[in-house]
Image (cartoon, rainbow, N blue to C red):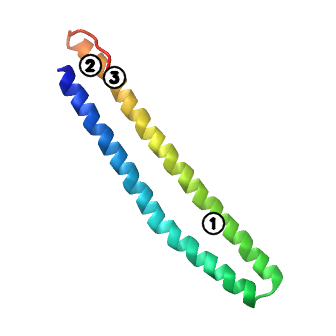
Amino acid sequence: MKDDIKTLADSLRGAFIDRGKIVKKEIAQTLVPAYNDVKRAIEVLDENLEPPFARGMVQFSNGCKSTEATFSRQSELGDAYDILKVRRLYAYVPCLIDDLGETKTSL
């Protein structure tokens, strides 16, 4: 029984890691092209527009960078939360074993 639970927990760990990688890749595929487009637009604007307007566009770019950093932190927090859920599962499994009247074990 203990080996079955450990096997189950180990299989879940891989799924969480794989999902985290997929989400990070999706975010990168979405945000990186958008960031590059904004960066190119700023380069064109710096060459062709008045300085006050160009400064506004730079501020917009900085806002985009800040948003991108926020998404990155959110992804990291999501990964940490997923790890916490797995740890909670590990902590809960011995309680289930106790409820079945078997010996409490730690993973």
Residue 44, by quadrant, is bottom right
Residue 16 screen position, x and y as percent = 35, 43
Residue 56, by quadrant, is bottom right
Distance, label 2 to label 3, CA atoms, is 7 Å
Please give left or right for residue 67 compared with residue 98 in the image: right
The mark lying in front, picked from 2 and 1, is 1
Residue at the spot of label 3: 92
Residue at the spot of label 1: 64
Please give left or right for residue 95 compared with residue 68 in the image: left
Q: Residue at x 76, y 88 (%)?
A: 49
The local crowd at label 2, few if under 14, some if 14 to 19, many if 20 or more residues have their Cα within 10 Å, is few
Distance, label 2 to label 1, CA atoms, is 47 Å
Q: Amino acid at mark 1?
A: Cys
Q: Quadrant of the N terminus?
A: top left
Please give left or right for residue 95 compared with residue 88 in the image: left
Q: Residue at x 24, y 13 (%)?
A: 99
